[in-house]
Amino acid sequence: MSTVSSSGRGLPVRTFRAGAAVAISNWIQKLPDGKVRSMSARRAPVESGNPQSKGPVPILPRPLKKDGTQARGREARATILEAAEAVFAEQGFKAASLDEIGRRAAMSKHRMLHYFPSKRALYEAVVAQLMGFVGDMVALYDDDRDSRFAALDLWIDKLAERPTLSRLSLFEMAAPPAEDSPRSFAPFGEQITAAFEEVFRKLVPKAESEECLHFISAIQGVTLLYAASLNEASFQGGRAHQRRMHERHRELVRSTANHLLSKISASSHDSFEKR
């Protein structure tokens, strides 16, 4: 076995390796905390005075690539979701095509399928993004019982902000049950309905169960159809006009809800008294 290092300077191999290990170890110890990750993937001499002693040597981690790969991935996903939301809202799930979504996103179908494996998976991701506020809405019912319409206001606001939400929801509701179309809104709808029903039961405890259904369908139907009818022409008057429209709609929905509750409460009381 040769005792000469590859450097050609005549140093014994073991002595050369020991010296290198000591130099690396001393350099590592001078680094700030958090810059070194200890690893014991291999063992090497750590003391120059005793080349035979062995122990774990800290090994520097590979530097992370700073090429923005993750940022570009997030941007690509956001672009695909935005294009898909528009196409699904205009054409519905069945008629929408990945080719059209890719055209609007300026992206190949192959690249889109890298992020979303199918049209159904893409649709479900769009719905999940649109309905991300449902948890906050349900929390308002739980935490703010004195404010009857806090959750209702949030529902109206979100529909007005994203008219595509109501259009997608109406497309899904209109699809025949036997058709192989996703029912991605169903779990979110169940949460919202349960939250509405909880408040309704507190406000009108003597009401029949079907009265709750009438109240929920009336309020949700009004807000869904209003939001679905919004288009570019609705906002040509600028933000001030848009804000006035929104505030007026919220005022009318609140008034409708109060009127319905009063009517249901009165009829429920009369029915209860006649028993």
Image: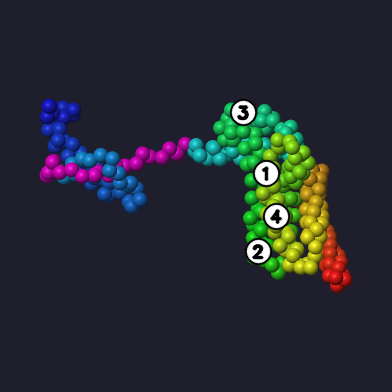
Lower position in the chain sequence, tag 1 or tag 2: 2
Residue 95 percent coordinates (x, y): 74, 32
Residue 79 visible in the current orientation: no
Residue 98 visible in the current orientation: yes
Q: Is residue 107 magenta?
A: no
Q: Secondary structure at mark 4?
A: helix
Residue 35 percent coordinates (x, y): 34, 48
For the residue marked with disc 2, what is the amino acid?
Asp
Check residue 192 in the rendering and tell me which mark sits there, or answer none: 4
**Does the residue at mark 4 contact the one at mark 1 (Cβ under 8 Å)?**
no
Q: Which residue is mark 2?
A: 142
Above or below for 82 versus 131:
above
Magenta region, mostly helix, strand or loop? loop
User: Of discs 3 and 1, which sits in the foreground?
Assistant: 1
Q: Secondary structure at mark 2?
A: helix
Q: Which residue is mark 1?
A: 184
Q: Residue at x 74, y 45 (%)?
A: 169
Q: Secondary structure at mark 1?
A: loop
Check residue 21 in the rendering and tell me which mark sits there, or answer none: none
Magenta-tinted stretch = 49-67
- Label 2 crowding class (10 Å Cα cut-off): few <14, some 14-19, many 20+? few
For the residue marked with disc 1, what is the amino acid?
Ser
Q: Residue at x 35, y 50 (%)?
A: 34
Lower position in the chain sequence, tag 2 or tag 4: 2
Above or below for 43 versus 187:
above
